[in-house]
Image: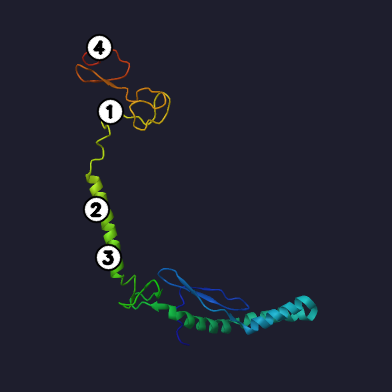
């Protein structure tokens, strides 16, 4: 028997009434559904089962027996239908001579190179993607080189929530809800030491805090 190709990636949708198969691209997953091929034996058995269910008795027994017989001989009919389905699906796919995968011609086959796009990527597509990626990288680099903190106080102690009422501060110096200062540490006018709010004298030089 000849080797049946293109069998790795498929789904069998066959029933006792006929045969149908769906073949998938090994690269992107796009699929091709073959035409449904009715089974003469299956249709006859289905009709016999219907008659058996209506009339009962001997017809019912005959239907059941015929169904079992049909199931027993389904193998050769199924194999023949599968081989025909492979031939029907093949024109929509190509087998890459490098990686041996079957890929769809519409999205994954490079006709200029005679290879799949995994083995021989499209040069124009790769160039466009590389240019876009390089542009993003250069934008990120140039943004990192910019000083975006000129309007932000980076030295004073910051608070995300107001210690008095718990409101969000949004970087303000005073709470937008209760109005209390959000950076309570003061500075000694004589020695420049940071002094906690409420202190009457500088802990370093003894200067009276105003």
Image marks 3 and 2: residues in contact by CB distance under 8 Å: no
The residue at 42%/77% (across/down) is: 93
Give the mark nearer the N terminus: 3 vs 1: 3
Q: What element carries label 2?
A: helix
Q: Where is residue 109 in the image (x, y as percent from the top left)?
A: 36, 74
Q: Position of residue 149 (x, y in %)?
A: 26, 37
Compared to residue 147, the image places residue 23 above or below, namely below
Q: Between 6 and 210, which is closer to the camera in this rendering?
A: 210
Q: Residues within 10 Å of mark 2 (few under 14, many from 20)?
A: few
* Circle nearer the viewer, 2 or 1: 2
The residue at 78%/76% (across/down) is: 54
Q: What element carries label 1?
A: loop
Q: Residue 156 carries which label?
A: 1
* Circle nearer the viewer, 2 or 4: 2
* Outermost residue, left side: 191
- The quarter of the rendered structure image containing the C terminus is top left
Compared to residue 203, the image places residue 105 above or below, namely below
The residue at 24%/45% (across/down) is: 144
Image marks 3 and 1: residues in contact by CB distance under 8 Å: no
Give the mark nearer the N terminus: 2 vs 4: 2
Q: Residues within 10 Å of mark 4 (few under 14, many from 20)?
A: few
Q: Which mark is residue 127?
A: 3
The residue at 43%/81% (across/down) is: 91
Q: How many marks?
A: 4
**How much space separates mark 2 and mark 1, taking CA atoms?**
33 Å
Give the residue at mark 2: 138
Give the mark nearer the N terminus: 3 vs 2: 3
Tell me how the rendering is colored.
rainbow
**How much space separates mark 2 and mark 4, taking CA atoms?**
54 Å
């Amino acid at each position: 028997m000849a080797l049946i190709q293109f069998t790795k990636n498929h789904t069998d949708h066959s029933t006792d009434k006929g045969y149908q198969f769906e073949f998938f691209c090994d690269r992107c997953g796009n699929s091709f559904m073959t035409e449904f091929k009715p089974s003469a034996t299956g249709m006859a058995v289905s009709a016999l089962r219907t008659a058996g269910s209506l009339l009962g008795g001997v017809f019912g027994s005959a239907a059941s027996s015929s169904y079992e017989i049909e199931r027993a001989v389904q193998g050769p009919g199924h194999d023949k239908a599968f081989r025909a389905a492979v031939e029907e699906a093949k024109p929509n796919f190509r087998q890459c001579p490098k990686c041996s995968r079957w890929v769809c011609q519409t999205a994954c086959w490079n006709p200029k190179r005679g290879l799949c796009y995994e083995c021989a990527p499209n040069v124009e597509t790769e160039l466009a993607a590389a240019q876009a990626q390089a542009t993003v990288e250069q934008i990120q680099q140039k943004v990192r080189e910019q000083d975006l903190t000129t309007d932000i106080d980076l030295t004073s102690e910051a608070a995300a929530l107001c210690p008095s009422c718990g409101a969000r501060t949004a970087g303000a110096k005073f709470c937008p809800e209760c109005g209390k200062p959000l950076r309570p540490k003061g500075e000694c006018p004589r020695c420049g030491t940071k002094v906690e709010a409420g202190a009457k004298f500088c802990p370093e030089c003894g200067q009276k805090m105003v």
